[in-house]
Amino acid sequence: MLERPTLILTDDDPGALRLLSKFLEHRGYQLRLAQSAKETLEILEREPVHLVLTDLMMPNTNGVELTKEIKRRNPEIVVMIVTAFASIETAVQAMRAGAFDYINKPVIPDELNVKVTRALEQFALRQEVGVLKERLARSVRSPDLIGESPQMQRVLQMMGLVARRDVPVVMLGESGTGKELVARAIHNLSPRSSHPFVPINCAAVPETLLESELFGYQKGAFTGATNSRKGLFEEAHGGTLFLDEIADAPLTIQMKLLRALQDGQIRRLGSNTPATFDVRILVATNRKLDQEVSGGRFREDLYYRLSVVTIQIPPLRERKEDIPLLIDHFIRSHAPTINPSVKSISPEAQHRLVQHDWPGNVRELENTIRRALVLCRADVITPEDVVHLGPEVSQPKPDGPSDLSTAHAAFLRSYFLQALERRRGNIRQVATDAGLSRKSVYEQLKKLDIDPSLFRGHA
């Protein structure tokens, strides 16, 4: 909530102004009284104002016109309308002009307080999102965080709220949605930003090595341990430790993580001396942790220890209104080095990309634009330049379903794209998942014209 918000109460009836003031004066607000739209606008010129509460019907002007003028001068100011029951239709017009809400006469104090509180919370939230966007622009220039969709706005709001609060955060989302980038942004926006951000992918490290990676080891702890080494808990001291794909951590490691978080201490392998640490824990997974707990694959006590706050990062198919923004960003980012002559994308090609389901999310879209820039022979990307997307199995052509070989190829493309996204281009892990040899996987990828190197080294 804002500290000492400033409110303008506008009504041509002095008695009504006194009544409104009486209802609000004990709430800690700074109240300014105006008996006309002209006085209201003069106050706005002199000092910052958070909310204007205005009567609908006044001489010379009305609440609708005043709302329009306030919003023209400063769209951030919240406007609320006080109206008689018979004027609700006009009040709705004021809301269309930008008013936040309306209050019926006679004014009920409790209703007034609730609505004013809610309106000021909305003002504070918009301010916080604006500040967060500016700070993100300075600290994290990430395409995965580009977007004006309601889903991405909620992610940004949550990031702003949790960044300053030193609690564990769980990030849920499919591969390629930018979970690590959100974690880095939270770290960069937090009081720990001057200290290390240390990430580890729990799925990419064998169980035998994961413990020593996290907790470190003493010289002689095992064969080959010729020197003592700090673990990631110690390396991240004062900063943030990001445990990616936490659901893939073995139960034995989960137990040791829980003990470390409970005690605030770790022990290196081969050592009996505990070491304290000061680390914020952020975790991510593409699985539903509550289902992993129900299935016995994730410790319930660790789940409750970690899931103080959860941020759900939407897949690209659920925020398609952001795709044109991302396309524009990727063209501007990659065209200068790949194909400087390309300046834009045709409406037809953009429509094709918007209609695609993007199993690999933002990373797949970025790679698609990079390939299109390679193929493009003009200054505008055309549908032919993005033809490699292939037909969608769920969206057959108008003249009937695809033939079996085409449908099979589309399925294989979708399967391997998702597998490469999930395993970040690691062919050995993709082959293990598919029950194939690495040679067979490489042969399939070659047939499907998929370059596995484009999936490596991204969050």
Image (cartoon, helix red, strand yellow):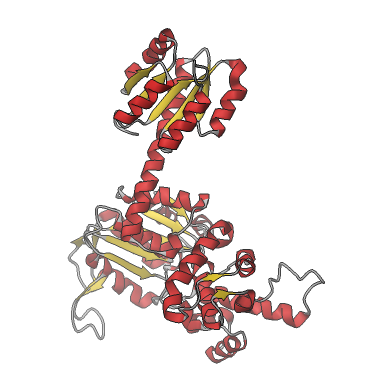
In the image, residue 168 sits, relative to residue 452, either above or below, namely above
Residue at x 56% of width, y 80% of height: 376
The image quadrant where one finds the C terminus is bottom left
Q: Is residue 18 visible?
A: yes
Q: Quadrant of residue 399?
A: bottom right
The image quadrant where one finds the N terminus is top left
Left or right: 86 in relation to 115: right
Q: Residue 304: where, in percent of width, then height?
A: 41, 51
Residue at x 45% of width, y 25% of height: 114
Residue at x 43% of width, y 32% of height: 70
Q: Residue 188: where, in percent of width, then height?
A: 30, 58
Q: Residue furthest right?
A: 399
In the image, residue 35 sits, relative to residue 284, either above or below, namely above
In the image, residue 11 sits, relative to residue 267, either above or below, namely above
Q: Residue 146: where, in percent of width, then height?
A: 45, 59
Q: Residue 321: where, in percent of width, then height?
A: 56, 57
Left or right: 238 in relation to 112: left
Q: Residue furthest front?
A: 60
Q: Is residue 54 or residue 398 the one in the foreground?
A: 54
Q: Is residue 154 or residue 369 the one in the foreground?
A: 369
In the image, residue 280 sits, relative to residue 267, either above or below, namely above
Q: Residue furthest top?
A: 15
Q: Quadrant of residue 442?
A: bottom right
Q: Is residue 426 visible?
A: no
Q: Quadrant of residue 13?
A: top left
Q: Is residue 420 or residue 321 the one in the foreground?
A: 321
